Amino acid sequence: MDRRKIPDNQIPAKGAAVSGQLMRDSGGVQEVGVRKNVGPESRSYIGANETEKKGTEELKSSEDFRLEDRAAARRDFELSVSRIGALKRRLSSLSLNKIELSGLPVEGEALGVRVVLRRAEELPPFSVGRTQISETLVVLSVTARQFVNLYYFLNFYRENPLEFEEVRSSAMRVLDEAGVAEGPIVLEASLYRKMPGIVRRVGSGVCLFEAESSIEAHDVARLLFHEESFPFVMMGSIALFFSESGALALEDLLLLKYALLTKFPKRHHSRFILFGSVVLYALGMRLPDMFDLLVDDKGAGRAFSSAIERFLVQETRSRVEVYCRGLGSWTGERLEPYDRWFGEEWPRLLGVDSLQELFCSPGRHAYFMGLRVTTLRDDIRRRTCRISPAACADLVALKRVPGLAQYFPFQIPEFPDSYWANYREYAMAAIDRAKFVRTINAYLKERYTFTLPEPTLWSLFSE
């Protein structure tokens, strides 16, 4: 099998650009200014001989507009990639007193992470996927598509190509040079403490990655050695990060990360966790609506609350929605419904005493780009609880994610008797059920560019 022929969803064509300018507003990253094509088929052809020249000129003008739009979008994209590069350099230069280190079996500035291509017979018994051999050793058996994802995350802090196809071809070239045979690609990831003057031997394998900076080491360690983080590599697709809008969202995420690491002492870093559409973005499924940030401020003090208001609520208003009781979105008329949701309903749904367990228990959160996010399992549970057309659309799309059925099988709930909108619950009798299903398709088309026949959607509720 030629490893270069990798099927992958949502792969943009090389050099593809979204027609239209890109901008931010209070709703996050948005595409605006898209011009509609005006082709010959839209014109009246009475007297076509007399208007043939004019029609050709109009068509040429329309093509010029499209080229101008693509060029503008491409410039915006490359500018965003340049800013992402600057942010990665700033993050890489942070000292360890800025980074929260808990949760790893080996901690401190001397942390070393290495990923080596191995022969299967040289390793302890392992299964397909991720096998935890010990606290400091995991074996990864991946497909070619998964290897491309992993290669991207491992080299994130280096100078990466601008195009998805370049990343994929570079990853395949690494496999070719390593002489990897047909079948699963087997890697050994080890975590260790660096010792001055001691060189760790790779053995007969080929070293694929070794961390060059402290933050790179800790981010990769949390990706590979945290059981709930690895599904983003195993099941996700990185193609979205190479689109114009996807790059802007990634820039916003890194800006948030930089603010958290530099504006808050590391003893407070475990008080933040992202949830919502960021989980689907981490899987490469769709752009985030906003970056929803849940904050635990119990016992943190007044200075912490002031920093939340200044650096997160005010300065990141256009891209981050903060949920901290008495601050951000958890205020005013939303205070009571959010008290019920975050204080009672969500913990009961997840089977925990309180949401503090999301922050404290390693099995209740994952890491994406070094930031804590809710696990994919808990995200699906949340979407199956407060049912809405938008949540149903996300669940339908999740059904299509390769490998998800084995990781966390789930069913779309029975057709609801009520639905949620604008933070309130409404009886289903108040709306037309057929309209509910049509709205699901509208969200599928907007977010995932596909729709399903209405009878198929109806059948999903009765499986």
Image (tube, rainbow, N blue to C red):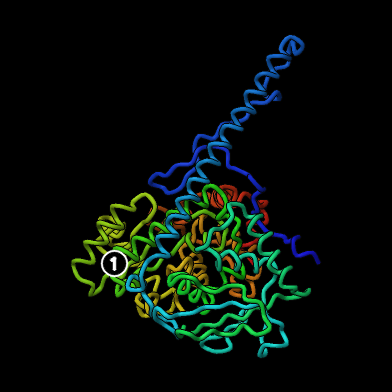
Where is 113 relative to 43, above or below? below
Tell me where residue 178 appears, x and y as whole percent: 71, 72
Residue occupying the point 36% across, 56% down: 321
Q: Position of residue 187 (x, y in %)?
A: 64, 78
Residues 250 and 106: in front is 106
Q: Residue furthest front?
A: 197
- In front of the other: 172 or 319: 172
Whole-percent x and y of residue 18? 58, 42
What's the residue at 62%, 78% (across, down)? 116
The residue under label 1 is 264
Please tell me whether residue 228 is drawn above or below residue 312 in the rendered image: below
The residue lying toward the viewer, choosing from 100 and 407, is 100
- Looking at the rendered structure, the secondary structure element under dot 1 is loop
- Crowding near pointer 1: few (<14 within 10 Å), some, many (20+)? some
Quarter holding residue 360: bottom left
Q: Which residue does the image show at 48% across and 41% down from the upper left? A: 22
Q: Residue at x 59, y 71 (%)?
A: 410
